[in-house]
Amino acid sequence: MRQQLREKIIRVCNDKITQKGETVGLSFYAFFANRNDDPELLMEAAEWWIRTHKLDHFEKAVKIRTMIEQQQ
């Protein structure tokens, strides 16, 4: 996964946790605008989320942040 996407995921997870608390869940769509402005990045996130890690549609932001941080 490219560094740009890692940084974006961590930033979004941190924002959601700050706003809604440690138990907030999100899907990989949370990292993108409502319109598909970067399809390659979206597919990279989907690949990581669905194929590589076989995650549920919604996962805890804390879990996702930890997974990304451990891969750096």
Image (spheres, rainbow, N blue to C red):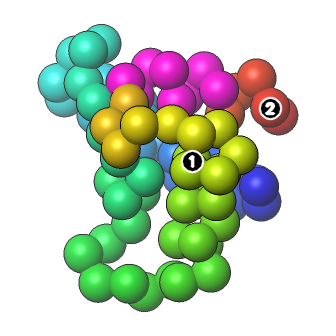
Residue 41, placed above or below residue 12:
below
- Dot 2 corresponds to which residue? 71
* Residue 2, horizontal then vertical, whole percent: 77, 59
The secondary structure making up most of the magenta span is: helix
What is the magenta range?
60-67
Q: Which mark is residue 14?
A: none
Q: Is residue 58 left or right of residue 1?
A: left
Q: Residues within 10 Å of mark 1 (few under 14, many from 20)?
A: some
* Residue 46, horizontal then vertical, whole percent: 55, 60
Give the residue type that dot 1 points to. Answer: Trp
- Name the residue rendered at 38%, 84% in the picture: 36
Give the residue type that dot 2 points to. Answer: Gln
Which quarter of the picture shows residue 43? Answer: bottom right
Foreground mark, 1 or 2, reads 1
Using the rendered image of the protein, determine whether residue 24 is visible from the camera's viewpoint.
yes
Q: Residues within 10 Å of mark 2 (few under 14, many from 20)?
A: few
**Which one is earlier in the sequence, the residue at label 1 or at label 2?**
1
Image quarter hosting the C terminus: top right
Q: Which mark is residue 49?
A: 1
* Residue 1, horizontal then vertical, whole percent: 77, 55
Q: CA distance from mark 1 to mark 2?
A: 13 Å
Q: Are marks 1 and 2 in contact (CB under 8 Å)?
A: no
**Magenta highlight on residue 40:** no
Which quarter of the picture shows residue 62? Answer: top left
Using the rendered image of the protein, determine whether residue 7 is visible from the camera's viewpoint.
no
- Name the residue rendered at 65%, 26% in the picture: 67
- Name the residue rendered at 60%, 21% in the picture: 66
Label 2 residue SS: helix
Residue 24, placed above or below residue 16:
above
Outermost residue on the left side: it is: 20
- Name the residue rendered at 65%, 38% in the picture: 53
Label 1 residue SS: helix
